[in-house]
């Protein structure tokens, strides 16, 4: 394939990917809605097993986090509210959970798992 065909194919696939992701998001929302209406976290339909799990994620406020971390060097290590880096610093006892108590909000995320049996 010449470069024009490669670029054209890439653009076509990228567009198709966006369409598929939109459809998958709509279907995901329908499956989650089904589970929530019936208050179930797992069901089997045909050859497929569906599991719905929830996870709490912390969304940090950059300004509040900067104020809570009094050491500018510590802020440079994080540079922006990165949950992974913050979790590592907590695990290593570089910072305490008490320091972070007012710097984030918790967000409940639905995780959907569909497996063919």
Image (tube, rainbow, N blue to C red):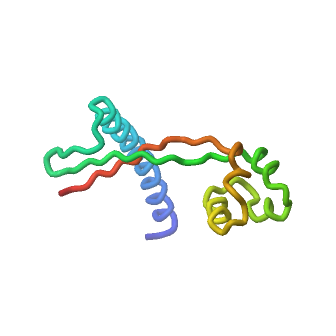
Q: Position of residue 24 (x, y in %)?
A: 36, 44
Decide if residue 107 is on the left or right side of residue 18: right
Q: Position of residue 12 (x, y in %)?
A: 44, 53
Whether 44 is drawn above or below 116: the answer is above
Task: Please report the residue visible at 42 percent of the width from the left and 45 percent of the height from the top.
Answer: 54
Task: Please report the residue visible at 84 percent of the width from the left and 65 percent of the height from the top.
Answer: 73
Disc count in the image? 0
Q: Position of residue 56 (x, y in %)?
A: 51, 46
Q: Quadrant of residue 117?
A: bottom left
Task: Please report the residue visible at 17 percent of the width from the left and 44 percent of the height from the top.
Answer: 45
Whether 8 is drawn above or below 45: the answer is below
Task: Please report the residue visible at 68 percent of the width from the left and 46 percent of the height from the top.
Answer: 101
| Closer to the camera in the image, 90 or 108 | 90
Quarter of the N terminus within the rendering: bottom left
Decide if residue 1 is on the left or right side of residue 92: left
Decide if residue 86 is on the left or right side of residue 14: right
Q: Quadrant of residue 96?
A: bottom right
Of all residues shown, which one is farthest toward the left? 46
Q: Quadrant of residue 85?
A: bottom right
| Closer to the camera in the image, 46 or 5 | 46
| Closer to the camera in the image, 12 or 38 | 38
Q: Position of residue 57 (x, y in %)?
A: 54, 48
Whether 113 is drawn above or below 28: the answer is below
Of all residues shown, which one is farthest toward the top? 37
């Amino acid at each position: 394939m010449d470069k024009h065909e490669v670029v054209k194919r890439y653009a076509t696939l990228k567009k198709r990917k966006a369409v598929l992701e939109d459809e998958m998001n709509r279907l995901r929302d329908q499956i989650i809605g089904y589970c929530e209406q019936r208050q179930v976290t797992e069901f089997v339909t045909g050859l497929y097993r569906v599991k719905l799990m929830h996870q709490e994620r912390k969304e940090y406020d950059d300004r509040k986090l900067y104020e809570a971390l009094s050491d500018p060097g510590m802020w440079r290590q994080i540079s922006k509210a990165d949950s992974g880096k913050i979790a590592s610093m907590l695990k290593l006892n570089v910072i305490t959970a008490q320091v972070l108590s007012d710097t984030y909000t918790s967000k409940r995320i639905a995780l959907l798992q569909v497996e063919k049996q």
